[in-house]
Image (spheres, rainbow, N blue to C red):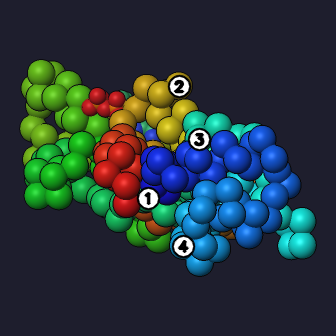
Amino acid sequence: MTPIELTKRQEEIIRIVKEEGPITGEHIAEKLDLTRATLRPDLAILTMSGLLEARPRVGYFYSGKSTQTLMAERLSRIKVDDLKSLPIVISDKGSVYDSIVTMFTEDIGTLFVVDEEGCLEGAVSRKDLLKITVGGGDFRQMPVGMVMTRMPNIVTTSPEETVFLAARKLIIHQVDALPVVINTKTGGDREVFKVVGRFTKTNITRLFVELIEGH
Ligand code: ADP
């Protein structure tokens, strides 16, 4: 996942392979006045990063892909499952007050509301809760169902979905978080979604920082 930053020698290897590839490691070493063993780590990095390709008995050749293309290819393979946070849920029997307390104690901005089987019923955001305080009423008694957004209007993701597609949903639907769900059809036609995680803008921000720090 590291952004590819090449050393002077690696740049030189790429130049030689671009001009003369396919070329064996032995020949590259000769041109650089180095031993094959000295070059081995550089060639390993360049092939692992996808900049060079190696064919047995033929040698190295340039893949023709820019570091940006390679980065995009790698990023597009990351799955929601690799980044998702633990699901923080509240029971559909809970009150508006319970959801405010849970948001504070768990330090999160969106709660998912589930039934007793852990199946998705709705979502409550900070602004949903702010809205209800403006309207007045006794929110210790008020059920969370009165303020939440309900299924089937919840935008979801799944563990196998790519982070790219999930991130696009966050942008298109203008929400901060998606429940990560597994679709479990019950007896009838009704689709039931078990909540197994949370995918938020924070997950993407963390990925961004980690990529640049080179984790
Ligand atoms: P906030 O309202 O605090 O800025 P959001 O932008 O995430 O937070 O929420 C906007 C609205 O969308 C709220 O009414 C909330 O209930 C609803 N919502 C939150 N998450 C989802 C989701 N994954 N799918 C559909 N609606 C959602």
Which type of secondary structure does the marked residue at label 2 adopt? helix
Relative to 28, is 107 on the left or the right? Answer: left
Q: Residue 107 appears at what percent x and percent y?
A: 15, 52
Q: Assess disc 3: are there few (<14), some (14-19) or many (≥20) residues with their C-alpha within 10 Å of its C-alpha.
A: some
Marks 2/1: CA distance? 20 Å
Residue 165 seen in render? no
In the image, which is nearer the foreground, mark 2 or mark 1?
1
Q: Secondary structure at mark 4?
A: helix
In the image, residue 177 above or below residue 132: below
Q: CA distance from mark 2 to mark 4?
A: 50 Å
Q: Which residue is mark 1?
A: 83
Q: Quadrant of residue 114?
A: bottom left
Is residue 33 visible in this depiction of the protein?
A: yes
Picture quarter containing residue 25?
bottom right
User: Which residue is rendered at x = 48% and y = 28% of the image?
Assistant: 171
Q: What residue did someone put label 2 on? A: 172
Q: Within 10 Å of the Cα at label 1, are there few (<14), some (14-19), or many (20+) other Cα atoms? A: some
Q: Describe residue 25's horizontal placement relative to residue 76 as left or right.
A: right
Disc 3 element: helix
Real-space Cα separation, disc 3 to disc 1, in angstroms: 23 Å
Disc 3 target residue:
67
Mark 3: which amino acid?
Answer: Thr
Quarter of the picture holding the C terminus: bottom left
Work out how far the residue at label 4 is from the one at label 3, CA to CA, in angstroms: 24 Å
Picture residue at 31% right of the left edge, 60% below the top? 88
